[in-house]
Amino acid sequence: MTTGALLIACGALARELVEVLRQNEWEHVRIQCLPAELHNRPERIPAAVAEAIEKSRDEYENIFVAYADCGTGGQLDRVLEKYKVERMPGAHCYEFFAGAELFADLAESEPGTFYLTDFLVRHFDRLVVKGLGLDSHPELKDQYFGNYRRIVFLAQSGAKDLSLLAQEHASFLDLDFAEQHTGVTRIEKIINEQVITWQN
């Protein structure tokens, strides 16, 4: 068994997690990312996480799962309870990026909100347009997004080019646009508490 820790993470968080580890020089923490496309099939997330834990649990002192519930309806928690492994708090990555209080305010102010992160902005065409079949069946756009009223871009990096791209995505979906800078401080705090402090 190694003396390090393993983060089993959603691929959508890879860039942010790598940056947090680099900035803090947490070199003993390894990241194993699962495909971000699992978010389109959340029922597959628990089995994928369980398989990753099974392969690595004899190698690491601590394993932490960088997923929220992510639409698994509590199934992920049942898997993690079996292995006594913790995960990110909340229902989804939007909540732990924004924080529970801010996310609740955003959801209350407009329930018909579609959220974007830096990752989703970069990969919108692959995960949303092609992933939902809007490239070949544009008529599906109204079926998928007819009840939405706005996009909120939860920005991690604050990059101007991503903001402009997010606005283009909102225009494509015929939705209003708002932006909220979240940074990565909450992810950093969670990893410090659940992984780094645990080992010390």
Image (cartoon, rainbow, N blue to C red):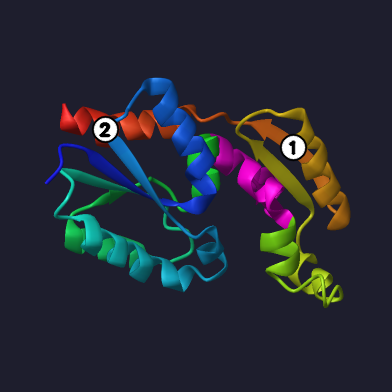
All told, the count of numbered labels is 2
Label 1 or label 2, whichever lies nearer to me, is: 2
Give the residue displayed 57% in from the left and 41% down from the top: 103
Asked if the magenta segment contains residue 55, the reply would be no
Amino acid at the residue labelled 2? His
Give the residue displayed 21% in from the left and 60% down from the top: 81
Q: Is residue 118 left or right of residue 84?
A: right
Q: Name the outermost residue toward the top.
A: 24
Q: Quadrant of the C terminus?
A: top left
Q: Residue 26 is drawn in which quadrant?
A: top left
Amino acid at the residue labelled 1? Leu
Q: Which residue is mark 1?
A: 162
Mark with earlier residue (1, 2): 2
The disc placed on residue 97 is: none
Q: Name the outermost residue toward the left.
A: 1
Q: Residue 56 is drawn in which quadrant?
A: bottom left
Q: Residue 78 is drawn in which quadrant?
A: bottom left
Majority SS type along the magenta span: helix
Can residue 185 be spotted in the picture?
Answer: yes
Span colored in magenta: 102-124
Q: Position of residue 48 (x, y in %)?
A: 37, 67
Q: Which residue is mark 2?
A: 28
Q: Circle 2 — which element?
A: loop
Q: Nearer the viewer, residue 150 or 153?
A: 153
Can residue 174 be spotted in the picture?
Answer: no
Label 1 to label 2: alpha-carbon separation: 31 Å
Q: Circle 1 — which element?
A: helix
